[in-house]
Amino acid sequence: MGAAQKKPKQAFFDDEYDDEEVLIVEDVMANETYSDNPKSEPIPEVNDGNVKVIVGDNWNEIVNDTTRDVFVLYYSPVSDAKKVHQLIGLWKLLGKYVSPADDIVIAMMDCSKNTVKGLCFDVYPTLILYTKENKQGILYPAALQLFSLNNFLHDYSQSFRDF
């Protein structure tokens, strides 16, 4: 590919969930061109909380760590700040729950301020699990509820099942 990166298709959310259960934020960056020069906030000096902060410059280091399963929330707070705030609260609960496990990372990236070459989405939020064995990622397609997130991790993360 040339300087602009082709955008991958976003998976659909399961039809059994209604609009109140699934938070879909319109993509505010739909027309933005992703170049060979991604943007990044500064790497956090301290990043040892229950939820790791990913920025453009540390994405590769965190996501491609083959000793850990990494579950990433990609979001953009620009469209609907209230819903994003609620989702981040849920994400922090999940991070607290799995924090005793050394080989599972719960992380999030603000896509309005950070980009990664070849990575962009049609809708936000987008959740992707990168397992130790599959660093291409597994897209989370269900409702944004703690129970559903736990079930997804149980189904796709050996580390979570061992936890």
Image (cartoon, rainbow, N blue to C red):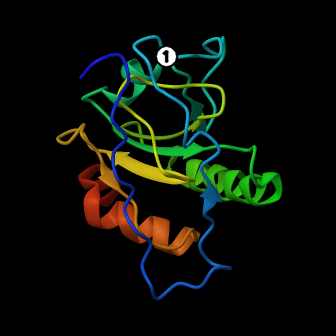
Q: Is residue 125 above or below residue 46?
A: below
Q: At 31% across and 26% down in the image, what residue appears?
A: 65
- Placement of the C terminus among the 4 image quadrants: bottom left
**Crowd tier of the residue under label 1, counting other residues whose Cα lies within 10 Å: few below 14, some 14–19, many 20 or above:** some
Image position of 76 (left or right of 63)? right
- Residue at the far bottom in the pictured view: 16
Q: What SS does tag 1 mark? A: loop
Q: Is residue 148 above or below residue 135?
A: below
**Number of numbered discs present?**
1
- Along the line of sight, the residue nearer the viewer: 124 or 142: 124
x and y, in percent, of residue 68 in the image: 32, 35
The quadrant in which residue 15 appears is bottom left
Residue type at mark 1 is Pro
The residue indicated by pointer 1 is 38
- Residue at the far right in the pictured view: 82
The quadrant in which residue 64 appears is top left
Image position of 3 (left or right of 98)? left
x and y, in percent, of residue 29 in the image: 59, 39
Q: Is residue 162 above or below residue 109?
A: below
x and y, in percent, of residue 81 in the image: 80, 51
Q: At 59% across and 35% down in the image, what residue appears?
A: 111
Q: At 59% across and 72% down in the image, what residue appears?
A: 22
Image position of 93 (left or right of 11)? right
x and y, in percent, of residue 14 in the image: 42, 79
- Along the line of sight, the residue nearer the viewer: 59 or 133: 59
